[in-house]
Image (tube, helix red, strand yellow):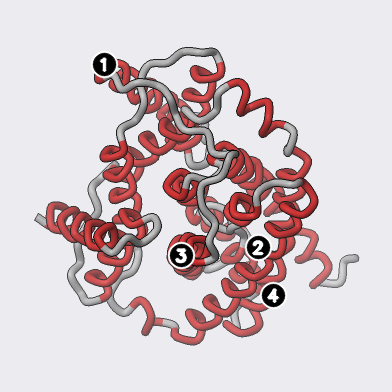
Amino acid sequence: MRIAAALAVCAIGGAVCAWLRMPLPWMIGSMLAMASVQMAGAELEPLPGGRDAGMVVVGTALGLYFTAPVVHEVAAYWPWFVALGFAAIGFGTLSAFVLARLGRVELATGFFASMPGGAADMALMGERFGAAPERVAVSHSIRMLLVVTLFPIGITLAGFSATEEYRPVLVAFDAGGLAALLAIGAVTGAIARRIGVPTAFMMGSLLATIALTVSGVQLSSVPTPLVNAAQVLLGCNLGSRFERGFLASAPRFVMAVIASVAITLGAAALVGWGIAAGSGAYLGSALLAAAPGGIAEMSITAKVLRLGVAFVTAAHVIRYVIVVLLTVPVFRLLEARQQGRW
C-alpha cells in the first residue's frame, strides 16, 4: 500500500509540473511531491528496484545518442572533460571546508559530504575515515534536490534551448527491439553491479547501448512516456530520502549544507562558463556538464531541454570516474596536512 501510494503521489507531482510546463517536470515533480509527503510524516516507500529500473531505461535512452559521428565529435572534448573532473575535486574540497566550519563537523564528514559523487559511494568511503555516514547521506540528498531543481530551471530561464549540436534519435520504435535493448541493459547493469562498478545499472546499460549504437545496430528507440516513467521512479527514490524531522534533526548542519552547496553551484557555473569559452561548446551544454548532479539526472535534463546529450553524458561519466578514483587520495593529503605530516 505504501509503495502504491508513493507511485501515485509521484506520478501526480510529475503530471502537475508537466501541466505547469516546468523543465524536467516528471523528475522534479515526483521528487518534490515525495519529499513533501515524507516530511509531513507519510512514511511512504519507493518501488523496490525502481531506481535500478529507471537507470536502465535512462542509460539505454541516452546511449542511443552516441552514433559514430557524434562520438567522433564528442571525443575532441576529452581534455576538457578531464579538466572538469579535477575542477569538481577542487570545488568539492572548497565546499568541504565551508561545511566543516559552518556545520561544526570533522573534516572527514565535511569532505565526503561535499564531493560530487554518488551518495552511497561517498558514505562508504567516508565511514572508513571516521565520517558520519548519515550526515554524508543527508548532505548528498540536499545537494541533489537543489541541483536537480535549480539547474534545469535556471538554464531554461536563461534562454538556453535546442541548438544545432542536438542530434535527435532517428531510430524507429520497435516493441521487440526495445524489449531486447532493455534486457541487454539490465543484464549488463547486473554484471556491472556484481563487479563493483558505481551506479552500475546506469553505467552498464549506457555503455552497452553505446557499443550497439556505434556499431550501427538499431533495435529501437525509447518512447518518451517510458523515459518519463523512469524519471518518476528516479525522482521518487530521491524524494524518499527526506523523512519527517529531516530538517529539524540537525538544523545547523542542514543550513551549512545549503551554504556549501550554493558555493559549489556558483563554482560549477564558473567552470561551465570556462569550458564553453575555452572549447567553443554551447554554454547551456557546458553548464549542464559542470553541474554537480548525478549522471542520470543531468544527462536526462540535456535530453529534455534538447541540448548536447552526448556531450553532457560523456562529461559526467568522466567526471564521476575521476571523483571516485581521487576522493580518497585527496582526503589523505588533506588529513596529512591537517596533522602536520607535510
Q: Is residue 215 visible?
A: yes
**Residue 313: % across, % down:** 56, 41
Left or right, residue 115 beside residue 147: right
Q: Which residue is mark 2?
A: 268
**Residue 184: % across, % down:** 39, 21
Q: Which residue is mark 1?
A: 176
Q: Residue at x 52, y 58 (%)?
A: 123
Amino acid carrying mark 1 in the image: Gly
Disc ID at residue 97: 4
Instruction: Name the element at disc 2.
Output: helix
Q: Residue at x 34, y 68 (%)?
A: 242
The label nearer to you, 2 versus 4, is 2
Instruction: Name the element at disc 4.
Output: helix
Disc on the earlier residue, 2 or 1: 1
Measure the C-alpha gap from mark 3 to mark 2: 16 Å
Measure the C-alpha gap from mark 3 to mark 1: 36 Å
Say which of 50 and 106 sits in front: 50
Amino acid carrying mark 2 in the image: Ala
Determine crowd level at label 4: few under 14, some 14-19, many 20+ residues with C-alpha closer than 10 A: some
Disc ID at residue 266: none
Determine crowd level at label 1: few under 14, some 14-19, many 20+ residues with C-alpha closer than 10 A: few
Amino acid carrying mark 3 in the image: Ile
Location of the C terminus (image quadrant)? bottom right
Q: Which residue is mark 3?
A: 153
Instruction: Name the element at disc 3.
Output: helix
Amino acid carrying mark 4 in the image: Phe
